[in-house]
Image (cartoon, coloured by chain):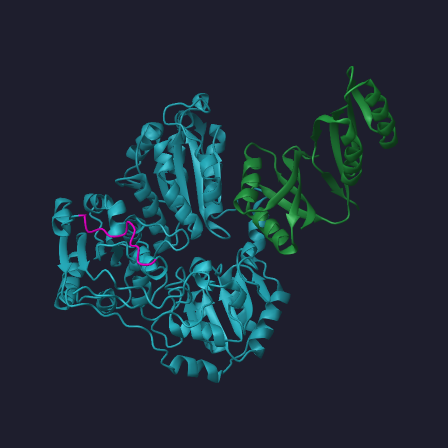
Chain colours: A green, B cyan
Amino acid sequence: MQEYVLSVKVANHNGVLPRVGGLFSRRCFNIKSLNAAETEEPNISRLTIVVAGDLKILEQIKNQLMKLYDVYEVKILTDAVTREHILIRAGRNSEDRHKIIEIANLYRAKPVDVAENSIMLELTGEPQKIDAFLSLMKPFGIIKMVRSGITALERD
Amino acid sequence: MLLTGSDIIIECLLEQGADTVFGYPGGAVLNIYDSLYKYSDKIRHIITSHEQGACHAADGFARATGKTGVVIATSGPGATNLTTGLATAYMDSVPLVAITGNVSCNLLGLDSFQEVDITGVTIPITKHNFIIKHIDELADTIRLAFKIAGSGRKGPVLVDIPKDITAAVCEYSHADPSKPLIIPEMSKIKDIYNVNEDDLARAAELIEKCEKPYIYAGGGVISSGAEEELKKLAEVCDAPVSCSLMGQGAYDQTNRRYIGMLGMHGTVKAAAALNECDLFIGIGTRFSDRVIGDPAVFGRHAKIVHIDIDPAEFNKNVEAKVTVKGDVKAVLKKLLERVSQKKNPWTDELIGKDHGEPVQVGTDEFPVTPQAVIEKLDELTNGSAVIATEVGQNQMWAAQYYRFRNTRSFVSSGGLGTMGFGLGAAIGAKIGCPDKTVINVAGDGSFAMNLNELITAYAHNIPIIEMVINNKVLGMVRQWQRLFYNKHFSQTTLDNRHIDYVKLGESFGIQTFVIAKNEDIEPVLKKALEISKTAPVMIEVRIDRDINVLPMIPAGKPIVDPITSIEIEREG
């Protein structure tokens, strides 16, 4: 199944997320990630939703979303800057830490918290870059991790 | 002027022309009921036996009149009792505004007495909902609720109002509902009325080229008031016409072009038309699974043109060649400008051919058939009564055998299939249309679900006819058990129930008659129709338990060669 990125403008008030989330679950649409925050207009939030499906399902998702009163605009992004942010803590001993820092430098990941045996890094980049970085981190034992989900803005 | 929240609610209802509301009082709506008391010369409130009945009544009122129905319920259980009614209205795109009370704002979220998160509960079964946390939002929110309920693809909207809001005082000034509300989102709703000319041209071209067009009309034709345009289009295209269950009444069924319903319990002729046609024009319909059967072979030789107000219905259940988004009436008007008069030999051939529709037969013990009763009812009422139904065999028989002449004359839960819908809905329909004869065609199973509303019919003297077709089984489920479950009639035989309908009716103050023999049909119906001019009346129709709904296409199977007879073993 293909993945698509939707950029959805919604009203910025309580109870919009359950409406959108509920729509995806009750219509059996597959949601891979969802990011929500205020936009330049304080009364509007932007949801960046990554969905899996085919073009038919994508059309359905778009049309069903537009039926929600709080949804103002749904765009399927084809040419966009996509970014994801992660925080990750990894490492089992001080030796690991050094190797981790080496890899972090390659990826320009930033150490944000250092403990005796492990280290916490932050990294922002395209999802593919994040995935590649994570696969290199895996041998060191990922202790904790949080991904923001994809955020995206279309290019002009 | 300064008014309390509850007075503002009533003023806003009156602004919208809602002079009749259905509901049930309770703690959280005490203030609202106090205002109803004060405004009782301007607004009529019908108290039902149960909030569910009130919601179905508001729904029936809306379906029969085209106005937005209003229901009021208290917090907690009052609100949750509305859910089946809201889901029913939502599935059938019926405009409703439900007003629920809630606990005061300072008690919200604390598991307070009779508190329930009804906006959370009803997200999937309302078009939209609101909870009001500030008195200054109250008036505009109610106005907006009516706007949302009655625009685009219509539907129910719930407004949850905490008790302290109904007591608070705020400045109120009258607003004319015809004036647009100043809210940016409405542009989205208005967009529906712009019909894409390219889509129209492509639809018109397909109509121009086809030789075997078949028009299939759904409830959207009724919602948009496009009955005249539908009639004209059928003439211009020279096409046969079917109506969906929700579309019953959109087209005069005595017109020679009308070939019956399509789908699971559609006519043999309609199934033949579907398989022979080269153009299938679906108007204001959502291609329900009960209609399309197996989507892979639906209309196998046909190109599909789909006209609907809701683009989310396009290519959802069947793939359409051309889709035209817009209000059905507006689309058909424009389409009529583009198509010229056709003559299709196929149409006459199809209409003239005898496709062998099944006919019901009774037994020695139960000679009466639903077909005979409903056809007689059709004759005696000239097809112009409002027929409400419950759900199951009774519903299909009413749809199959009553020949609807007028729009908004069939009130039935199509999408959700709500047993217990009909009696409340009939009450609402009668209040909305006091000059029309209103009959609820029920089965004994559905009747037992919400018979409490007979009390309402008597108490408010709402002169409906409640017709209980009594086969002492849950007939539709029994029919499926016979066909697909080795005749394991699990929990569908109601022989252990004892109901004396005459005594039951009379104990509620409702005269009740029995049809047990064919000779009873006409005199009892005539008597009931006479009584129903002034008082509610009930009829029990005793029938055999194995009269099935035919024709039938099993679920998910192609709409080809419907079953027209089912062998029944007879004891002794």
B253 lies above or below A65: below
- The answer to whether residue B442 is left or right of residue B407 is left
A59 lies above or below B230: above
Q: Verify whether residue B490 appears in magenta.
A: yes
- The answer to whether residue B67 is left or right of residue B515 is right
- The answer to whether residue B48 is left or right of residue B270 is left
Q: Nearer the viewer, residue B145 or B249?
A: B249
Q: Nearer the viewer, residue B66 or B388?
A: B388
User: Residue B104 sits in which quadrant?
Assistant: top left
Q: What percent of the width, then of the height, locates residue B248?
A: 37, 63
B157 lies above or below B249: above
Q: Residue at x 87, y 27 (%)?
A: A102
Q: Nearer the viewer, residue A63 or B184?
A: A63
Q: Magenta region: which residues?
A: B486-497
Q: What percent of the width, then of the height, locates residue B387?
A: 29, 59
Q: Nearer the viewer, residue B76 or B370?
A: B370
Q: What percent of the width, then of the height, locates residue B540?
A: 18, 56
